[in-house]
Image (cartoon, rainbow, N blue to C red):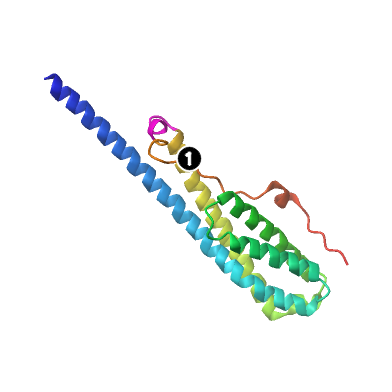
Amino acid sequence: MALWIILGILFVLVVAVISMYNGLIRLKNRVDEAWSDIDVQLKRRYDLIPNLIEIVKGYASHEKETFEKVVQARSNAMSLQNSDNVEEKLQAENALSSTLKSIFALSENYPDLKANQNFLELQRELADTENKIQASRRFYNGNVRDFNTKLQIFPTNMIAKQLGFSSRKFFEIEEAAQKENIQVKF
């Protein structure tokens, strides 16, 4: 009789561990999928930037420093695309977003540029891409929240580390980038 009770308890424990593990795997895959969605939108942004710069160069050729900053930020972000270091990726993407704002600030000083159909179309596409990145970031952060919460609650927190799970970082905009005004000097 005692043997059946012990076997029953072991069975319940094994089922509980399997259930927790499967739940963690499910949430981890959602986080990975959400990050993949962000990567798709970032790739789209990387592809749009060179075209945008070429159009703006024709109107504001003396703004070489601004263009170089955007190109450098894009290169940095692209070089980290396959990196597993989320923190570095986030910093590079925040830097790229910041430098892109300077390109659009330049357009305010060039009425002909603001009227250029190619520029307007690229600006619209880039704005659409930025909106999709924001939506993907919110989706990713929601999944990270759920995953991290699952890792922290009892009884999952007791076995998650032993199963190789660790918390993920949120995709956040640096506070300086949120509040900083773009400076355009001539």
Give left or right: position of 134 versus 97: left
Compared with residue 17, is residue 169 higher up or lower down, i.e. above or below?
Answer: below
Compared with residue 176, is residue 82 higher up or lower down, i.e. above or below?
Answer: below
Q: Residues within 10 Å of mark 1 (few under 14, many from 20)?
A: many
Q: Is residue 155 magenta?
A: yes
Give left or right: position of 62 versus 41: right
Residue beneath the point at 64% across and 52% down: 91
Q: Is residue 64 magenta?
A: no
Residue beneath the point at 34% across and 38% down: 20
x and y percentages locating residue 160 in the rendered image: 40, 36
Q: What residue span does the magenta drawing correspond to?
A: 153-159
State the image quarter where residue 120 is shown: bottom right
| Element marked by disc 1 | helix
Residue type, mark 1 in image: Asn
Query: Looking at this rendering, what residue extends furthest in the right direction?
Result: 186
x and y percentages locating residue 8 in the rendered image: 18, 27
x and y percentages locating residue 96 in the rendered image: 67, 60
Give left or right: position of 80 versus 112: left
Compared with residue 7, is residue 61 higher up or lower down, i.e. above or below?
Answer: below
User: What residue is disc 1 on?
Assistant: 148
Residue beneath the point at 11% across and 20% down: 1
State the image quarter where residue 6 is shown: top left
x and y percentages locating residue 38 in the rendered image: 53, 59
Query: Looking at this rendering, what residue extends furthest in the left direction?
Result: 1
Which residue is more in the foreground, 115 or 133? Answer: 133
Look at the image and tell me in which quarter the C terminus lies.
bottom right
Counting the numbered discs, the total is: 1
Residue beneath the point at 59% across and 54% down: 89
Which residue is more in the foreground, 118 or 170? Answer: 170
Give left or right: position of 28 versus 88: left
